[in-house]
Image (cartoon, rainbow, N blue to C red):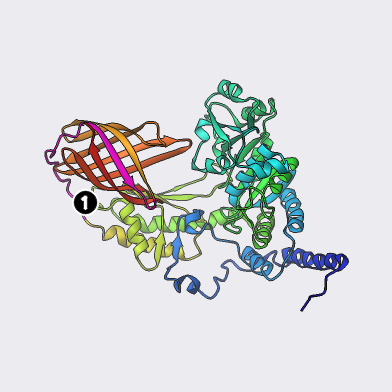
């Protein structure tokens, strides 16, 4: 059967009708938050439980790995309603972008796949400039401007979003170094939100003015910030600023915003999905676009950040009051440095009285019923509670569990005496680490003094890193610290050691699991 063709006029009417429905969506859900202080959570968490995944109370706020912040009820309604209709993404973006820009006070805006997607598309815009051939060639930037300057104190793991385009990062630490680094191959300048912090070697305004004097645009990753109006980054001369939609904006978790110069926003959208070019992989859906527009509208209409902070502070004061009688535990409210952030609760305890570390407490909280996800991790004796993903009433459960865990904590473990080393480990070693689907080889040099070990290592990525640890009998523990680009690598090697061979397990970091390692002495 052959379906009849749809004429261009009918197709235009059809699209107009769909867009009218979507425009109605934005008005129909406005004010939903005002109607209810505790949104419905649907039919329950069965969609996860049938897969064997049990949800938790989320005290980590906006962490992507834990699902992001608590979406506004009108955002959930917008996403659900938008899913029932189809629209052309170009047409939708052409309407959504100006609406967002008008609300946030920028020349132009686009919805992206998270803040990282915004940064990647923004960087690609600075490199390719809307040239179809350059956009298709990325991330091969040969023959193009392919350098990005960045202040040394503003480097991070999130530089991946820029480096993905194929540019080389050039670190600078003074204004003079910045001026020397800017040249004919400089495509853009980059940085994180900490460029607004006091005490840096130069201010954000100095950064933008120096870059602009050489025709270089500035792109800032402000993922965790609340977009303020007037915008402090645009006011300082920044050309493009990226925000997450799924953090304090409380929109769809995988959405983001790129805000700024109209020409660069256009070039960024050209290089992004739905277009079949470099940014195709950082796709954003019609539901996310609709939901993010509603989240930004709510920020300037039905939503009150002051009321949210008052509610969250009340939760923290209640937790504080319940923890106060527990010997050895302190809880302190920490207020944000500016309006972009929110209060947190710092909880600390005395390891001489309470016999678990933060990582052990975090595991106990997550193993209980209901599960509670926190920032309690590592070997310290404190962690922070963050409120933006918690629902009303959950703070009481958290307080009750914390009191129970601290009161029922094991006694501090007595420190075991170190045994004489089984072997002298000073010298050169070759280490093989076997990962999930590959392996690597390190070369390290150890100094050995009593039970103490120190040294340096080189890997295929890290030019030189440090090592420190100890040996007791045959048991060895080594901690390594290396750095590459904006990334720190901190591993913990544990296992057994002999005169010519060491082996065991290395903890690769909280997101990366562990791997076996074997070392042999080099003669």
Q: Position of residue 438 (x, y in %)?
A: 38, 49
Q: What is the secondary structure assignment of the residue under circle 1?
A: loop
Magenta region includes residue 413: yes
Tell me which residue sits at (73%, 48%) in the image. Answer: 101
Please name the residue that numbered disc 1 is placed on: 412
Q: Is residue 395 above or below residue 169?
A: below
Q: Nearer the viewer, residue 78 or 448?
A: 448
Name the one closer to the observer, 189 or 124.
124
Q: Which residues are magenta?
A: 411-437
Front position in the image: 386 or 476: 476
Magenta segment includes 397: no
Q: Is residue 60 above or below residue 140?
A: below
**Can you give x and y, in whole percent of width and height, for residue 307 in the image?**
58, 56
Q: Is residue 207 above or below residue 231?
A: above
Q: Looking at the image, can residue 415 be seen?
A: yes
The C terminus, quarter of image: top left
Question: Which residue is depicted at the point 39% across and 65% down?
Answer: 371
> On the picture, is 424 further left or further right than 469?
left
Relative image position of residue 41 (x, y in whole percent): 54, 70
Residue at 22% across, 42% down = 502
Residue 350 visible in the shown view: no
The quarter of the image holding the N terminus is bottom right
Specify the farthest residue to the right. Answer: 9
Relative to 475, 166 lies left or right = right
Secondary structure that dominates the magenta span? loop
């Amino acid at each position: 059967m052959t379906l009849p063709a749809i004429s261009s006029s009918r197709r235009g009417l059809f699209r107009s009708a769909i867009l009218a429905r979507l425009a109605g969506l934005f008005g129909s859900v406005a004010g939903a938050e005002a109607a209810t202080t505790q949104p419905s959570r649907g039919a329950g968490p069965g969609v996860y439980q049938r897969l064997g995944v049990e949800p938790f109370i989320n005290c980590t706020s906006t962490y992507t790995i834990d699902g992001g912040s608590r979406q506004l009820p009108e955002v959930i309604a917008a996403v659900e309603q938008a899913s029932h209709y189809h629209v052309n993404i170009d047409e939708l973006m052409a309407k959504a972008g100006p609406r967002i820009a008008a609300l946030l006070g920028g020349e132009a805006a686009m919805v992206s796949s998270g803040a990282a997607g915004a940064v990647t598309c923004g960087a690609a815009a600075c490199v390719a400039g809307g040239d179809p051939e350059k956009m298709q060639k990325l991330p091969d930037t040969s023959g193009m401007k392919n350098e990005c300057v960045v202040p040394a104190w503003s480097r991070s793991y999130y530089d991946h979003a820029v480096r993905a385009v194929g540019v080389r990062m050039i670190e600078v630490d003074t204004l003079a170094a910045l001026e020397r680094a800017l040249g004919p191959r400089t495509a853009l300048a980059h940085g994180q939100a900490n460029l607004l912090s006091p005490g840096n070697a130069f201010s954000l305004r100095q950064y933008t003015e120096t870059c602009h004097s050489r025709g270089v645009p500035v792109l800032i990753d402000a993922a965790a910030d609340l977009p303020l109006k007037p915008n402090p980054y645009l006011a300082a001369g920044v050309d493009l600023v990226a925000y997450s939609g799924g953090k304090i904006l409380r929109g769809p978790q995988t959405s983001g915003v790129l805000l700024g110069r109209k020409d660069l926003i256009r070039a960024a959208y050209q290089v992004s999905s739905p277009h079949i070019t470099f940014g195709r992989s950082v796709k954003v859906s019609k539901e996310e676009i609709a939901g993010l527009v509603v989240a930004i509208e709510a920020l300037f209409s039905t939503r009150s950040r002051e009321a949210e902070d008052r509610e969250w502070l009340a939760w923290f004061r209640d937790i504080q009051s319940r923890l106060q009688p527990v010997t050895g535990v302190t809880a302190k409210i920490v207020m944000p440095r500016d309006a972009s952030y929110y209060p947190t609760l710092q909880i600390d305890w005395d390891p001489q009285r309470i016999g678990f570390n933060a990582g052990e407490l975090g595991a106990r909280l997550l193993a209980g019923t209901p599960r509670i996800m926190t920032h309690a991790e590592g070997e310290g004796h404190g962690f922070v509670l963050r409120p933006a993903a918690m629902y009303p009433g959950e703070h009481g459960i958290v307080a009750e569990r914390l009191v129970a865990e601290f009161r029922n904590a094991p006694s501090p473990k007595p420190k075991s005496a170190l045994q004489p080393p089984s072997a002298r480990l000073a010298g050169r070693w070759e280490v093989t680490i076997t990962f999930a689907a590959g392996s690597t080889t390190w070369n390290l040099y150890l100094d050995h003094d009593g039970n103490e070990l120190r040294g340096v290592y080189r890997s295929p990525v890290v030019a030189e890193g440090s090592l420190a640890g100890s040996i007791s009998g045959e048991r060895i523990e080594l901690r390594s610290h290396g750095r590459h680009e904006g990334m720190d690598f901190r591993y913990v090697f544990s296992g057994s050691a002999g005169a010519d061979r060491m082996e065991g397990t290395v903890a690769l970091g909280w997101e990366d699991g562990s791997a076996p390692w074997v070392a042999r002495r080099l003669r």
